[in-house]
Image (tube, rainbow, N blue to C red):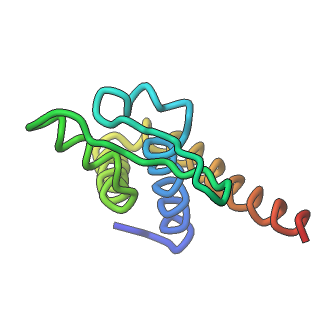
Amino acid sequence: MFTSWFLLVIFAFASFRLTRLLVFDKITKFIRVPFIEEKQVIEEDGEAVTYIRIKGRGIQKFIGELLSCYWCTGIWSTAFLLIIYYYIPKVAEPLLLLLAVAGIAAVIEVIVSKLKDE
């Protein structure tokens, strides 16, 4: 399936970015709200901690558990990307490129932020 290491790297960064988008980003909070409740608490040491409560039963609970687990969502995000790449490559290629570039940019931003803080 993977014809090159380059394609593997593209998939890795695209999957990373899609997973973070679904599980953590503010812009997709509307997707998580029906399934999980996020509550931010300030601890005694001043650190902000986010607690998650999964809502509902059945499929609602299943999706809530999925969206609260980075590793679980990562598997399904990767499966989604692989399936559309296999069946609809004309749609998948620009999406993969967009997500991969955004993922690489996120990694670069973290590195630059860490270097700036030193």
Query: Observer-nearest residue: 11 or 26?
Result: 26
Q: Residue at coordinates 47% horizontally, 31% vertically from top-left?
A: 29
Query: Observer-nearest residue: 87 or 77?
Result: 77
* Residue 68, image x, y percentages: 35, 49
Query: Observer-nearest residue: 104 or 90?
Result: 104
Residue 55 drawn above or below residue 82:
above
Q: Residue at coordinates 55% horizontally, 59% vertically from top-left?
A: 13
Quadrant of the rendered structure where residue 26 is?
Answer: top right
Q: Name the side, left or right, on which 71 lies relative to 96.
A: left
Total numbered labels placed on residues in the image: 0
Q: Residue at coordinates 54% horizontally, 40% vertically from top-left?
A: 25
* Residue 55, image x, y percentages: 23, 35
Residue 93 drawn above or below residue 56:
below
Pick the quarter of the image with the N terminus: bottom left
Quadrant of the rendered structure where residue 54 is?
Answer: top left
Q: Name the side, left or right, on which 76 lies relative to 102.
A: left
* Residue 79, image x, y percentages: 29, 54
Pick the quarter of the image with the C terminus: bottom right
* Residue 117, image x, y percentages: 88, 65
Q: Name the side, left or right, on which 86 lies relative to 111.
A: left
Find the residue positioned furthest to the left. 58
